[in-house]
Amino acid sequence: MAKEIERKFLVSGEFRQDSPESYRIMQGYICSDPDRTVRVRVREDKGFLTIKGRGSEDGLSRYEWEKEIPVARFLVDYVTSYRKGADLPIPMDAQAPPTYDWLKPVRRQSTRVGEIGGGQVPVVLDEIPVAGAISANPFNFTPETAEFLRKHPEVIVVSHPQTTNRLGEHRALALSLMNLGLENPLLIYQEYAEENLEHLQLKAAADTGVLFIEGLADGLILQNHAGGISVEVVRDLAYGILQAARARFTKTEYISCPGCGRTLYDLEGTIARIKAATSHLKGLKIAIMGCIVNGPGEMADADYGYVGAARGKVSLYKQKDCIEKNIPEEEAVERLLRFIEEDLKKNENKQPTKEQ
């Protein structure tokens, strides 16, 4: 971690005309704790995450960690590309029904067809269903289609966008079904031809993730037609999008601080050990925090926590409650795993399954 040595000067007069260049900067703060400031800054076409420690007594220096957010520019460019479809305006009323609250979205009601719809967790499919489904988008969704769906609530609608405004089309079709009172299950279908896995992840998340946050869909179908990325990886991506949207939990999540001068154990090594030992569990949140100062507060929504208490000592938590204090570091990981297993056995209803 580098040390920032700051000097400030008050400049007077007409200095701007002598400036060789200027930048537009936008920034916001995730955390402004006296011991740690976490800032997100966008400068021109780049994004940066900066963590600053407590300043020195004279206020002239403090430790600083800064990393560029490489995906920021890519996401901006990709979402901006939606506008290329502006010459094909979506011919559908994309307004939500009066009862729908964008700030507190409720899952769209749909008919249960097997494992799809009816309030069940969203499904992930590799292919469009061969039978019992129709593909639709805002351009081919006619009154005749609506009437057919009204007579056949068991037919699944597969949203298959036509323009670069993929998200807009998916959302417009979902809102149209709601406005027409149609409760047919809705699957989101999105196809790509990406050879770069990170690009595929970013595009798919941008195109589909928010739809599940908004409760508009009953399942996700992702396909990638370029080589090098397996069907299994694409399927795992789909599950990851649903989990990020808090719509379906299929894997353990880990919360960790970035580490600072108060971290008195091998944070990265401990994270790796805990992940390796708990990756088979599903639907849990496990926090690994460097110190007792801010750790318990930052891991408040975790199911279990591993928090540095002192040099060579660790405390274990269940949610906000400390259940074991000052455990020797060399025993802490095994003690955490044993406690999780015992706690899950006490209440089988809380035991994670492969797919919740």
Image (spheres, helix red, strand yellow):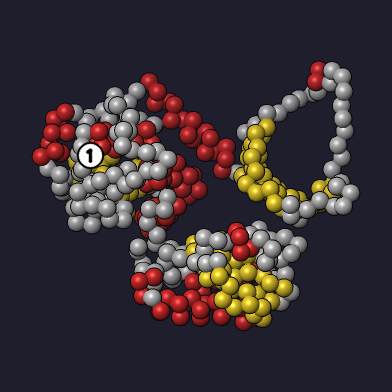
Residue 248 appears in the rendering: yes
Q: Residue at x 49, y 64 (%)?
A: 285
Horizontal relation, residue 121 to residue 279: left or right: left
Q: Pinpoint residue 341: horizontal percent, then vertical percent.
A: 46, 78
Q: Residue at x 65, y 75 (%)?
A: 314
Q: Quadrant of the C terminus?
A: bottom left
The answer to which image quadrant residue 85 occupies is top left
Mark 1 crowdedness (10 Å alpha carbons): few <14, some 14-19, many ≥20: some
Helix or strand or loop: what does disc 1 sit on? strand
Image height of 300 relative to 90, above or below: below
The answer to which image quadrant residue 167 occupies is top left
Residue at the far left: name it: 151
**Of residues 232 and 186, which is closer to you in this image?**
186
Horizontal relation, residue 310 to residue 349: left or right: right
Q: Residue at x 31, y 56 (%)?
A: 121
Mark 1 lies on residue: 135
**Of residues 322 and 137, which is closer to you in this image?**
322
Q: Pinpoint residue 25: horizontal percent, then vertical percent.
A: 68, 32
**Of residues 347 and 139, which is closer to you in this image?**
347
The answer to which image quadrant residue 266 occupies is bottom right
